[in-house]
Image: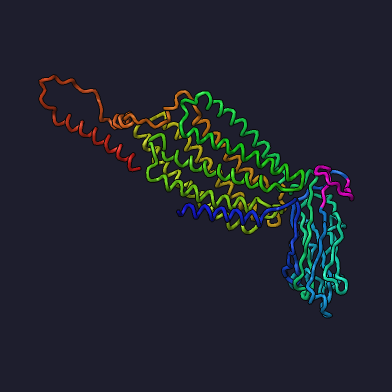
Amino acid sequence: MASSIGSVSFLALLLLLFLFLVSEASVHDYSKERFVQRGNAFVIHGGSEGLYGSLSEPNSSSSTSASNGDSFIRFEKITFTRTKETAESKETGSSLVQAIIFEVEDRESIGGSAYGGQRAICCTPDLAKMESCKEGAIIYRPSAKNPDWPQVFGVSFEEMDLVASIPSKTIPITKTGMYNLYFMHCNPKLEGLVVEGKTIWKNPTGYLPGRMAPLMNFYGFMSLAFVIIGLFWFSQYARFWREVLPLQNCVTAVIALGMLEMTLWYFDYAEFNETGVRPTGITIWAVTFGTIKRTVSRVIILVVSMGFGVVRPTLGGLTSKVLLLGTTFFIASEVLELVENVGTISDLSGKARLFLVLPVALLDAFFILWIFVSLSKTLEKLQARRMMAKLDIYRKFTNALGVAVVVSVGWIGYELYFKSTDVYNERWQNAWIIPAFWQVLSFSLLCIICALWAPSQNPMRFAYLDDGSEDIDKAESLGFISPGPIFSKDTKSSSPSNANASHGINANLIGDMEEDKRE
């Protein structure tokens, strides 16, 4: 009953995320957005994206072709609507509303300070004398590298009009950089002012934001990599299909999920880049298949670490705990990935991601802890029973996991450093490497698992045997069994020492079997 309620709640959450995050096109859409006070100005953040400079001469006609080499920001149907009370008021004052586009390197050219006081964005009477700015307008100075930037333009309300519109226009981008757009006004009496419309941001090769653009080629290469490993695995699988173990079936599922995930991500980015319309359905499927793959991979590694199918036939009472951990990780990871990817256009990460990433990180840490504790116990059992072939595989598996964890921790440290030192996203051209690294790391670990547990002619070298031979191996390793004399029929009784030895063997075998049952 509880699981059914949980499933319904999860589906409802997915529906809400779909409704709120769905994006209809490669645009920054403004639907009655309200201005928020920042210092002495009232602002709306219109978008932030990394844009590459045009590959050709800027084309004022702005061809709709995705790969025509032009890079631009286009304003379409931008309208500002004020309240009727504000329009009828005779003391409203300035009704100027402006849009400002600036490259992040020129951020210091926005605003000014009078007599060493707090930095202001809007021109005050004191600043009008010092900065030669117009009172009630945005303060800005021309860029040292490009006198035509920042780009500032605006519109004023006429008399009693409730609506003012910015004419459709295109801003060519000739210099590669991180660009920011803000709508601003400086009049506190324009309370209730809202903006509607959209802006389209285009790179020379298509509509993908600069941070996302390299990922399209990356997922293309990853799709090819999964095809190669799939050909190897499936050929071995078909060759020895009679000897295939349940664990190998699980690895097959992970490879298939990986193929689907990489292919869907590639088509998601390719469609978005070419048409300007993000295929939300493909994005959701790509996120879901990726989350299932990560969840199944972690669960497989955990149960293998526990020795399932190698030193124990079942997980016993641990099955429900493993399933609960896997389900919880799937839900937390799915929500995080949906928030981060579905409808995402801006190159800036939202605060919601920081909040949602904590549960995933904690669950990942719990997985790692449980895996290594289980591996330690399994290695001890294999060592005690002298199962040398299985022990060798598990040692290699442990070493691979250890290296992966160390590399992951090091990369997390680098990621924190990267993000903490890149407050204004100036290194956006390298940001794609961070998500790409985790895909490469998980793929590398999958390759190692495929090499260690590939289908073969002799699968029993790492499979659980229920014929008592493993218990005998353990007894032999402890030195309880050794060749003894053959007694004649006249022998009525064994010596006490032989009786005690026999009793010791039986006790150890029974105890070992009971231990496996309890686990």
Task: Residue 101: say if magenta.
Answer: no
Side of 431 where 11 appears, left or right: left
- Residue 125, can we see it? no
Q: Could you say which quadrant of the image residue 213 lies in? A: top right
Tell me the residue at 81%/74% (across/down): 124
**Magenta portion: prevailing SS class:** loop
Rendered location of residue 332, percent (x, y): 54, 52
Q: Name which residue lies at 73% across and 67% down.
A: 34
Magenta segment boundaries in residue numbering: 57-72
Residue at point 44%, 24% (across, down): 458
The foreground one among 414 and 456 is 456
Question: Which of the image's four quarters has the N terminus?
Answer: bottom left
Against 490, is 359 above or below? below
Q: Residue furthest bottom?
A: 90
Image coordinates for residue 404, horizontal then vertical, percent: 53, 41
In x, y percent, where is residue 253?
A: 54, 36
Q: Quadrant of the C terminus?
A: top left
Vertical comparison of 269 with 108: above or below: above
Image quadrant assignment for residue 466: top left
Q: Is residue 298 visible?
A: yes
Residue shown at 24% from the left, 36% from the top: 507
Asked if the magenta segment contains residue 60, the reply would be yes
Depth order, front residue of 361/236:
236
Q: Position of residue 415 (x, y in %)?
A: 62, 50
As displayed, is residue 39 above or below residue 266? Answer: below
**124 and 346: which one is in front?**
346
Q: How is the image coloured?
A: rainbow
